[in-house]
Amino acid sequence: MRSDLPFALLAVFVPFSLVSIGGGTSIIAGIQHQAVDVHHWVTAREFVDFFAISRAAPGPGMMLATLIGWHVLGWTGAAITTLGLFLPSSLLCYGVVRIWSRHRGKRWHTALEEGLSPVGTGLILAGIVSILQIGGGGLLSWAIAISSACMLAWRPKIHPLLILAGGASIFIAAHAATG
Amino acid sequence: MTTPVQRVTIAAIFSVFFRIGLFSFGGGLTGWVYRDVVLMRGWLNEDEFLSGMAVSQILPGANIANLSIFVGQKLRGPLGATVALLGLLTAPFFAVIALASTYDLLKTLPNAETALDGVAAAAIGLILVVVGKGARRAARRAAAFIAFLATFVTVGLLHWPLLAVVVVVGPLSVLSAWLRRSADA
């Protein structure tokens, strides 16, 4: 392995960490371009597979970066790309949150919290719509999403894993029924 | 409104976020954090959580990583934030590598992709619960409800840039909350 590889990985992933406003989906195309076309760390096919794996695995979708690092440089590479992508944005976030929390209890802080809370809610709902549009499940996805929300609202203590297993079972059954 | 001061242990923070990282198949992490942190444990109240959500989305980085830092910092300062983030990422770090190592085998499993789509759809239900709570809260004040709708429609349906929308709607919404507070005082 080339000795400059760790630095090349950092040079790609650190900037992506700091421009990933709106979350991981905003930088996937950029990472693909760098990893596939510019640096040839993975083939286009491998990138698609890694994307699918990071969706299948639990945790944030950005763990895609972990896989690229692991693919080119084993455990070291995995650690480098994970830290490279998560650490810079996390430090920035920590700084902001710290300033934020220092003013807790002041009137403008309460106003900020009350004012930003509906904006946060709107953003979450917007995120849901874009996830449902990207995913190929169509109407069935919407139906499952809404009924699982109703289940959870009705019985908040149900373990979410049961709900997830239910969603998988219904999809498999529907798939089998429609051939 | 802030939640009463309570001492949450570092171990408890790690364990909650570790489990969220381990179990959150199909996404829906926001919903998991809401359930574990607000609903089950009352570590944060709803306004704290939802405003933290907005901050997490504006800043660069995975929303869920930022949200974990927000929660961890609020509970136990720098150590809390570090432990929340580490807890969140530990299991997924090994899980993606394990899945990648066995991917060729997994691909041969029948229905794997269909099952995954079903899991992802159900996981959205977890986040919808958060939206339901937030929307009901927003509905108490006209200005808040307008801010909620405006954000959702412009970002979610019209695909306007998130940052631009937040920069416009955020301050207006905050201003209205401030004016209402001032009127009350």
Image (spheres, rainbow, N blue to C red):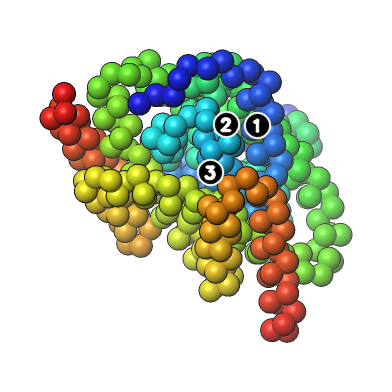
The residue tagged 3 is B30
Image x and y of residue A102, in percent: 38, 15
Q: Answer with the quarter of the image where residue B182 lies.
A: top left
Identify the chain of the residue marked 1, using the numbered disc in the image: B
**Label 2 sits on residue:** B41
Q: Quadrant of the N terminus of chain A?
A: top right
* The C terminus of chain A: image quadrant: bottom right
Q: What SS does tag 3 mark?
A: helix
Amino acid residing under circle 2: Arg
Counting residues from the N terminus, which is met first, the one under dot 3 or under dot 1? 1
What's under tag 3, amino acid-wise?
Thr
The residue that label 1 is drawn on is B16
Image position, residue A174 (x, y; %): 68, 76
Residue B136 position, x and y percent, is 36, 49
Identify which residue, B17 or A33, lies in the foreground: B17
Under circle 1, the secondary element is helix
**Residue furthest left as drawn:** B183
Residue B109 against residue A20 in the figure, above or below: below
Tag 2–tag 3 contact (CB < 8 Å): no
Q: Residue at x 86, y 59 (%)?
A: B105
